[in-house]
Each structure stands twice: as C-alpha cells, then as structure tokens.
Image (cartoon, rainbow, N blue to C red):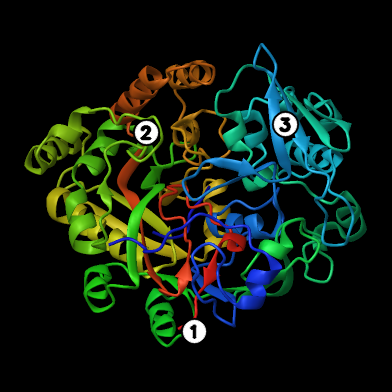
Amino acid sequence: MKFSKSALLGSVVGVALLSTSAFAAGVHPETGEKLADDQTFTYRILDEHSSFDPQINEDVSGASMARNLFEGLYNQDNLGNLVPGVALSHTVSDDRQTYTFKLRDNAKWSDGNPVTAGDFVYAWRRLASPELASPYQWYAALMSVKNADEIIKGEMKPEELGIKAIDDHTLEVQLTRPLPYFTAMTTHSSTFPSPEWAIEAHGSEWTRPENIVSNGAYKLAKSVPQEISVLERNTQYWDNENTIIDKVEVLVINDENVALTRYLAGEMDLTDAPAGQFPRLQKEYPDQAVVFPRLCSYYYTFNQRPSGPEEFKDVRVRKALSYALDRRVITDAVLQAGQFPAYTFTPAVTAGFEVPKVDFSGWSQRERDAKAKELLKAAGFTKDNPLEFDLVYNTDEGHKKVAIAMTQMWKQKLDVKVNMSNMEWKTFLNERKNGNFELARGAWCGDYNEASTFLDLMETESGYNDGKFSNAEVDQLLSEAKSMINPQPNYTRIEEIMANEMPVIPIYHYTEDYMMNPRLKNWPIKNAEQNWYAKNLYKVAK
C-alpha cells in the first residue's frame, strides 16, 4: 500500500465486549476506566486519500478509512492475528486450493440490507475487471485466485473468477495453487464487499455521503475534499452495541508543523511527529510521544523504462547513487525517531523474514563512498562531465528534508547535480504510474505481513513496479515462493539480486512516531501492519 508519509503507549488491553449496562455506568467493563462523555476520535492525515471505494483506493490513509467504513472476511486484533469479520470461520480443501468461508448471518449494510456471499463475489470480480481498471487489480492475481490473471488481461470474463456464493452465507474461493498466507490477504481493503445496487444506481458518485452504503462499524457522514471527512456510527453494524467511539473526524493538514500546533491546542487526538522533532517532543510530552516499528519501507525508484534516463540504465550509476547515501545520517540526524537504515527492501519486522547480509550493508560508509566514486567515474561521469537528473517527491516537509540531505551527499561526494521538485499526492501517484519521472520517492507499507508484500513489487508485471525493473530470475523466484513452506532462500536471493541490480534505493525502514492523546486507549502498537479499527478504541475521562 502506498504511503504518503514517513516509551510505548500504556494501557494496551484486549477489545472487550461491552454491554449496555456498562455504557449506562460510563465505565469500561473490562478495565473499569471511566469513559469520556465525548467519544469523538480526531486524527490528521497528510494528503486526501485516493478514494472511499475499497476496490479503487491505493494508499494507507484511504485503507484506514475503508476498514472503518467496510468490513471484509477477517479483521486483525491488536497483535495482527486474524479475528472474525464477516466470516466466522473457514475450511481448506486437502489440496489447499479451495477455501470455504462461513459468513455470519447478522451482518448488514448501512441501509439494512443483509451482507451476503454475493456481495464479496461482486466486489472481487469488480477488482479484477479491466472495466474498473483498479490500481489494485493486480492484487486479485497476487492472491492466486483462479483465472484472475486471464481476466486482468482481458482473456476471460470477470464471471469466470474463482469465487462463488454457495448460498447467502457460504463463500467459496478457488486458487490456482496453495498460498499459505491467503487468509491474511483478506484483511486488505481491496477484498472488502461492495454494494452492487448502490454502485449501479450512482456510478462513480456512489461513495458520496448521501449515496454511500457501507457494512463496517461506521458510515460516511461528511466529506469535504482536502479538508475533512466525518464518520459516524453505523447503527446497522452487527456489533454496534459494543462500539464505544461514536464519531471519527479525519483532518487533511499538509503541513506537519501546523498539524502539531493544532494537536497541542487540543484539536485532535493523533498526528505524526514532524521530522527531527521527536526527541524534543518525547522529553516535553513523555505521555504523548509514542514510537514503534512499522511494516513499511522508504525508498527511491529509478525509472528504467525505455523512455527513462539513459544514465539510469547503467547499473554502475544506480549503485553509485545508493552507496553514497549515508543512511545513518538520514535516520539519526534528519528524522530522529528510531527509523532503521535500510540496505534491503524488506524490513526486519516482517513476520518470518530473516534480513540477508547483502554486500554493501557490511561496508563502512567510507568504503561505500569510495566505491561510489569509482563506479560513477567508470560510467563516464566526472567533475567535468557531471551527472544531472530530476528528483521528485510528494509534498511534505519530512520528504523535503530527506531529499535535501540526499542531494547534498551526492553533490559533496560525487559532484552530482539534482533538480528537486514536489507534487501534490494524487498528481504524484499519477505521474509515477505513467512513468513521468527520473528518480521518484517511494514508500510501501505491507498489505499483509509476509515478505512477498514487498518483494512482489519487483515482479515484472506488478501494478506498482513504477520503475519497470524486470529480471527473469526474480520473477521465477517469486512464483516459486508462493507455494513454498519455507520461502526464505528465495527471498534472500531476491534481495541479493536487488542489491546487485539496484532498481530502487532503500533508504530506511519505518517507525511510527505519533503524538497521541493519552486519553485515547487500545491503539494496536504491537501490530506492525497498523491495521487499526476505530470500533476497538475508546477515550477515558480526564
């Protein structure tokens, strides 16, 4: 999932099943904490999400909205484990290629219609269909759903996708091969059900507040683009009586320092700590500054399309630019929130993944700098013939600081000239997708907690392989890994190939550094995916 941005929280407790008597008493039934009268959760995002439509959204902030508006087969608990959503359970065939989900019979849409297996069939066919051309269309194929590849290519009809409703509460999914982490992939927003009748009635405007029909714990009450979205309780939700947060307000604030000022003024419950300010904030507000690892990677991608810069087709140039970056300076001096310098694409926090020792990760920075100079000179670039290119990032003060640090390192060490520019988020996504860049910022947060969620971006046909890197061995290794009990050797080899070919420059692996209202409880800080659900949160009284 594309990400537009870059001492732990106390009192993390399990989600309780609240009774009406508990609400009457105004206390949390499990912890005994006195609940605040106003259960409004307000948080800030950097950019307007790409869409409320679960099959069209392509960014992290939009996925958070989708998880609150819609509910898929499974949700996650505070540790990232699967828990029932619309599906209560599932069985798997002996060949591990057919999954049968038993759906709850009390799930409803916000208009009162029952949620059925047919709503998932409609949504998954919609996701794979060339007609919708979803930016996450490739995810249906990534899940190994039968015939997804052929449908995406236009060789089969969406009706031939390997998913069907046995009855209203039984859903069957057929895979082309065993996929050990298939169920984990169903927590992704692109797999959530969609209301066919609302989409047919309103077309692309079905997600407007007056038209939208959702099946999650909340419904969309207000949406002012680039300003605010408001979610209110969905009284038709099957577990509405056990939800505490009544309203969710999402503020779009492009300036992280303005956001911090407004947070400190009490206007919101959650915002990102501005780049470089976390140490100060942690000292001044020890009960509000929180940090923890996040399943995300920050990188820059080279445009290796035929139309891309000729210079970047030379691996020596790509390696030189990567080696010359002192990642420790970026994490420790620029960002200062515990981020991890990255020499591989996949972060160490990824479940079941062992970070391989790629060659340049074990060198000193002096050794990397010397090799960078040697490579760039061998590629024909010197002080008299300097390398020059354009770098683009999406508008954000933190991204700007990182980009400035990078360009200064390249200038001082390699005499490279870089022309920096920034773009608004949706324009940035579009330009990257269309290949209108030379070197572009990238960030990826795992769609599920397994290494393939990162490495699959390097597959030739991946929908988010914006630089169009292509390597036949990588494609083969990824294909083989999907059905392997232990795919680590394949993942290790892919990371080695990436270090040797350098299609992207890994910069750092994320931490989440928040300023969080200490009265807000039950944030899932131990879930590296950060799949949070407002229905599991609550606010205590002062």
Circle 1: residue type? Glu
| Marking on residue 267 | 1
Location of residue 516 (image quadrant): bottom left
Q: Is residue 311 above or below residue 47?
A: above
Q: CA distance from mark 2 to mark 3?
A: 29 Å
Circle 2: residue type? Lys
Of residues 377 and 59, which is closer to you in this image? 59
| Marking on residue 313 | 2
Tag 3 residue: 152
Circle 3: residue type? Ile
Q: Is residue 125 visible?
A: yes
Check disc 3 and report its element: helix, strand or loop. helix
Q: Are marks 1 and 3 in contact (CB under 8 Å)?
A: no
**Could you tell whether 537 is left or right of 146 in the image?**
left
Residue 147 image offset from top left, x and y in percent: 74, 23
Single out the mark in the foreground, 1 or 2.
Answer: 1
Which callout, 1 or 3, points at the residue further toward the start of the chain?
3
Q: CA distance from mark 1 to mark 3?
A: 45 Å
Check disc 2 and report its element: helix, strand or loop. helix
Which callout, 2 or 3, points at the residue further toward the start of the chain?
3
Residue 311 image offset from top left, x and y in percent: 33, 39
Residue 183 image offset from top left, x and y in percent: 61, 32
Farthest residue, direction top: 95
